[in-house]
Each structure stands twice: as structure tokens, then as C-alpha cells.
Amino acid sequence: ARVDVPFTYIHCAIDDYIPFCEYFIIPYLLWFVYVFATLALLFFDLKHLENYYQTIATLIIGMTASLLIYTLFPNAQNMRPTQFTHDNIFTQVISMLYATDTDTNVLPSIHVFNSLAACIAIAQSEQLKKHPVISNGAYILAGLIILATMFLKQHSVIDVMGAVLMAYTLYQFV
């Protein structure tokens, strides 16, 4: 984490009503598989590669824009629990996550942005529309990933809203 700049702490009142829930580590970590699987499915839809390229471009531009925002507007959050009520495999994995992923660079949430960009791509895929189990499962997983960012206290509702705005805006222009 950068220590040479003052951070703006991101928080809103709604965040205080969202409880910490360690079980959300499962969809949070499935994000890696979700984004990769989405890109793989789009890549192998050879008749509609434009959707793949549009998704890749959206992801690259969005993540680059996020890094630019983090640089120009250093931000952080301080909502993480200092101790866990339970000691189980879920909280142990979260402890490792917290140790490796600082609570800085939170607005917008890249987890949420990438999940939504993948969701939009799936919704636009002619091939995946033929497989409602896959597409509906992907939408549900994306929703759980987005919720996980808040239930694990990785992101504020504000971070999520910023990512939603960025994902839908960028996808229109790419």
C-alpha cells in the first residue's frame, strides 16, 4: 500500500447495516474462475468473436481507469473486522486475504466491475443465450460475488455503485 499520500476513506451508513459473513469468501474467490470461464466461453464462440473483443477491451479500459482513479484519488476503507467470531477454514482464508490484499484502492471495485462486464458479455452472447442454465448461473454467481465484496467488508456500497456506473458506461462506448 502507498504510504506517501493521504487516503480518502470510503464509507456510507448502509455499510454499517451489512453484517460480516465469512461464507461469502467462496463466491469472492470464485471470481477468478468466473472471469476466466466467461472469457474462455466467449473466445470459443468463433462466430461472435466481436463480443469477446468488446469484453476484453472493456476489462482493460476499466481496470486501467480504476488504476488511474486510485492514483489520482487515493482511497481506502476501514470496515474490516479486527477479530472473527468464528475460527474456521473460511475465516482463516479471509485472514490470508486481508494479509495480502490491503484495504486501499477500493473505489471503484475491480471485483464488481469485472463481474458486471462479464455479466453484460454473457447477456449479449448469442451462443450463451441458448444455454439458460449457464447464463442464469453466471448471473447468480456475479450477484453473489458483488454481495461478497460487501459481506466480507472488502468494499463499501459506494465502491459497488461506482463500479456499476463504470461498467455500464464503458460497455456502451467500447
Image: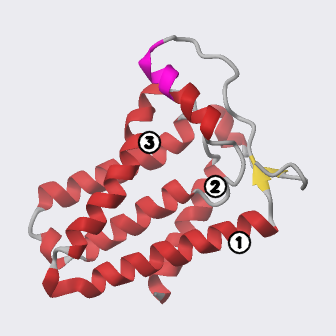
Between label 1 and label 2, give the one nearer the viewer.
1
N-terminal of the pair, mark 3 or mark 1, is 3
| Residue 47 horizontal side relative to residue 2, left or right | left
Q: Amino acid at mark 3?
A: Tyr
* Residue in the image at 38% along x and 40% along y: 27
Residue 84's image quarter?
Answer: top right
Mark carried by residue 68:
1
Start-end of magenta stretch:
88-93
Q: Measure how far apart labels 1 and 2 are at the Cα level.
A: 15 Å
Q: Are marks 1 and 2 in contact (CB under 8 Å)?
A: no
Q: Secondary structure at mark 3?
A: helix
Residue 92 located within the stretch drawn in magenta:
yes
**Can residue 46 be seen by looking at this rendering?**
yes
Q: Amino acid at mark 1?
A: Leu
Residue 11 located within the stretch drawn in magenta:
no
Mark 2 neighbour class, 10 Å CA radius: few under 14, some 14 to 19, many 20 or more: many
* Residue in the image at 50% along x and 63% along y: 113
Find disc 3 in the rendering and name its residue.
28
Q: Measure how far apart labels 3 and 1 are at the Cα level.
A: 24 Å
Mark 1 neighbour class, 10 Å CA radius: few under 14, some 14 to 19, many 20 or more: few
Find disc 2 in the rendering and name its residue.
159
N-terminal of the pair, mark 2 or mark 3, is 3
Residue 40's image quarter?
Answer: bottom left
